[in-house]
């Protein structure tokens, strides 16, 4: 039986902490879907769903068992729809635990047949987040050890070209 895992998130934008979890998770499943959440209008996202999907796709293109899909609505229902029996999350510092624990319990209530597993971050990415990357780029810092070059190019186009038009 082909085992499918789902790694869901906003990926606004994808960074090396996400990719480390994705590549490790890809070894645990026959097929890993990275689910990019189509945040509701009111949630403040920097990149559109299409941009976020494209950036993840570009980053994982050498992995033949990883697929990138956008979704909206409840993550567990998306997992069910694509036939994923396990959802993968990444855990950083302690502050993630409370949120992840509550989410996993809520999802367990809705779809008890779908398990949530958490992979512990690589220590070099333990403080890395999309919002930190945005802060660094917006202030002309160097994020090259945090995001792949194609993501940096998107940032430059968005922050330093569009705004100057
Ligand atoms: P969210 O689903 O919270 O909107 P993100 O797109 O920021 O999230 O993250 C998606 C998943 O990746 C979450 O499980 C999150 O905990 C995990 N993650 C984010 N940053 C890191 C990191 N630096 N190391 C490991 N996991 C991470």
Image (cartoon, helix red, strand yellow):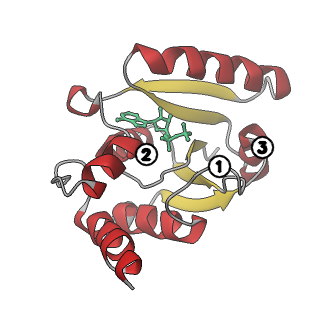
Quarter location, residue 125: top left
Residue 55 in the image: state x and y as whole percent. 42, 66
Which residue is at 54% across, 52% downward? 34
Question: Which of 152 and 60 lies nearest the eye of the viewer?
Answer: 152
Q: CA distance from mark 1 to mark 2?
A: 29 Å
Residue 70 in the image: state x and y as whole percent. 64, 60
- Where is mark 1, residue-wise? 43
Mark 2 burial class by Cα count in 10 Å: few <14, some 14-19, many 20+:
many
Tell me the number on the disc at residue 152: none
Q: Earlier in the sequence, mark 1 or mark 2?
A: 2
- Where is mark 2, residue-wise? 26
Quarter location, residue 56: bottom left
Tell me if label 2 and label 3 are in contact, CB under 8 Å.
no
Which residue is at 66% across, 53% downward? 39
Tell me if label 3 and label 1 are in contact, CB under 8 Å.
no
Quarter location, residue 105: top right
Mark 3 burial class by Cα count in 10 Å: few <14, some 14-19, many 20+:
some
Q: Secondary structure at mark 1?
A: loop
Q: CA distance from mark 3 to mark 1?
A: 24 Å
Looking at the image, is mark 3 or mark 1 nearer the viewer? 1
Mark 1 burial class by Cα count in 10 Å: few <14, some 14-19, many 20+:
few
Looking at the image, is mark 1 or mark 2 nearer the viewer? 1
Residue 66 in the image: state x and y as whole percent. 48, 57
Tell me the number on the disc at residue 80: 3
């Amino acid at each position: 039986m082909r085992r499918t895992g789902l790694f869901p998130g906003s990926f606004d934008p994808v960074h090396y902490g996400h990719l480390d979890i994705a590549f490790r998770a890809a070894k645990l499943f026959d097929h890993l879907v990275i689910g990019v959440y189509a945040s509701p209008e009111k949630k403040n996202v920097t990149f559109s769903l299409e941009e976020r999907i494209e950036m993840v796709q570009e980053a994982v293109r050498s992995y033949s068992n990883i697929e990138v899909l956008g979704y909206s609505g409840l993550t567990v229902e998306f997992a069910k729809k694509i036939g994923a029996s396990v959802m993968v999350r990444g855990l950083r510092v302690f502050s993630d635990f409370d949120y992840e624990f509550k989410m996993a319990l809520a999802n367990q209530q809705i779809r008890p047949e779908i398990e949530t597993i958490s992979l512990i971050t690589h220590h070099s990415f333990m403080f890395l987040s999309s919002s930190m990357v945005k802060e660094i780029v917006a202030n002309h810092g160097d994020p090259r050890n945090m995001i792949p070059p194609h993501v940096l190019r998107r940032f430059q186009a968005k922050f330093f070209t569009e705004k100057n038009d």
